[in-house]
Image (spheres, helix red, strand yellow):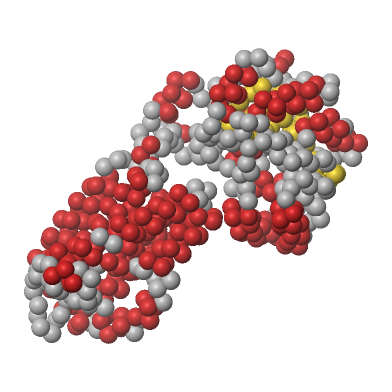
Amino acid sequence: MARAHGELTAPAQLEAEENAPPLTPPRLWLVAVLILCALTAVSIFLWDARVVEWVHQVGLDKWAKKWVWLRKLRVIWPGHFLCTLLIAALVAIFHRTGLRSAWMLIVAGILSGANSIIKWTVGRPRPDWKTATPSFSVHPFKGGIPGLFSQENLGFPSGDVALAVSSAAALGYLIPRWRIAWWTMAIIVAFQRIAESSHHLSDVFAAAALGLMAFHCARVACRLSPDSIKVPSGPLSDLRRTVATLPASMESKPYLSLVIPCYNEAENVPTLLTRVEAALALTGKPFEVVIVDDGSTDSTPRLLHEAMKTKPWLRVIRMAKNGGQSAAFEAGFEAARGEIIATVDADLQNDPEEIPRLLPMLDQQNVDMITGWRKDRQDTPFRKWQSRQANRIRNWISQETVNDSASSLKLYRAHAIKGLRLFNGAHRFFPTLVKMRGYTVYETPVKHSARFAGTAKYGFRNRAFRAFIDLIGIRWMKERNLRYQATEVTHSEET
């Protein structure tokens, strides 16, 4: 078996990778909680009183109270539940896991609210350097049942810190690249609560332990556990994009490769394969069809597996988990072996019968890419309207003249698209990305049909905002794209 970019992987090594240890050890979070609990106990007896006195002596309490207005803004304060709701809304819109991750954040925030019950049960007052209240003074169930709903002077543990830590842990899991920023946010909340003399140091340690437990309970409840994620081990552990393919002889190399991303399209697969086979046979060229199963959870994998037994031109690439259309396209491009690479969607809105007509255009127009323009779209009025606006905005910001950049019906010369490293959402900008590599693009009207069966995977909610952010990135890439000419000097030339 072979990996993309020429890296070879033996079957035994692939099996070892599948059995690799989890990304996050299952009990690592429990160790962190136990350490925080130990620090809480030590702080109660050794550090709390000293920290309270030091905060007052250096004037941190007076300085911190000047910034109380920031905490009262609530929506931007990481220790307030309104801020958690705002973050959850942004995650639902922009993160690939969508609502499930948003629910995890909200559930973690709700569970961290257990600090109110603990405060009432323990009844520990807030720091008071004037009365020299012992740091370990407690009054269990203070105020009786009504006291559970009125906790003005109770401090153990800190509710703000518990919520900030649970949010930081959740965001650190969902967006690990910014993990330092999320935990810095939680540390700032903890520092503010101590500096304001609102909490003892032990209150913060206990709240951090509670926040971690809340996050991991929410993670399990929402089935977003990293404990089940498998990653490569050994020298290939830093690779994030791998495509394992079967070896192929030179004699079987096709002229045309059709790449089709496919996610939960069981209702379309049989018709798709029938139409694709009939359409590509009209080209008179050897062909292959590479269907990238993007982590389907319906009967799509079974249908594709059965079809492979009777269709020798069919190849199936199975993504380890749903990675989105851009990831599926990149995996398909890397696996494709043809001189020409074509793409369509699996929903049959792109007519595969158009491919024989478009194929000669690469030579007729002397270009490296043909991109389809769905001039007469068969969609709902709202979907057509939002597509028109999206293309106008896309062209305005990216300084392009493409009428339909997001159409999946495209043909490429293999050298124009292979090796292009994509980002999530890049499939909407293929004409621009190909041009940035120095290749030529020609746009032509193509047929567009109503969805044959199933439901659309993209809509305004999971497309508009993400696409706009990606568009800003594309504009930046165009502005910063390198442009130069260089030639090697020969011995006969004068310097």
**Farthest-out residue, front:** 145
All told, the count of numbered labels is: 0
Horizontal and vertical percent position of residue 102 = 45, 54
Q: Looking at the rendering, which quadrant does residue 318 occupy?
A: top right
**Farthest-out residue, right:** 364
User: Which quadrant: the N terminus?
Assistant: top right
Q: Looking at the rendering, which quadrant does residue 263 occupy?
A: top right
| Residue under the point 35% across and 46% down | 221
Horizontal and vertical percent position of residue 281 = 80, 21
| Residue under the point 70% across and 27% down | 271
Left or right of 220 in this view: 235: right
Left or right of 124 in this view: 355: right
Q: Looking at the rendering, which quadrant does residue 40 occupy?
A: bottom left
- The one of 373 and 42 positioned closer to us in this rendering: 373
Task: Indicate whether 20 appears above or below 48.
Answer: above
Task: Indicate whether 78 appears above or below 177.
Answer: below
Residue 371 seen: no
Task: Indicate whether 73 appears above or below 21.
Answer: below
Left or right of 162 in this view: 379: right
| Residue under the point 84% across and 23% down | 282
Residue 258 seen: yes
Horizontal and vertical percent position of residue 280 = 79, 25
Left or right of 198 in this view: 321: right
Horizontal and vertical percent position of residue 308 = 62, 18
- The one of 292 and 277 positioned closer to us in this rendering: 277
| Residue under the point 74% across and 48% down | 379
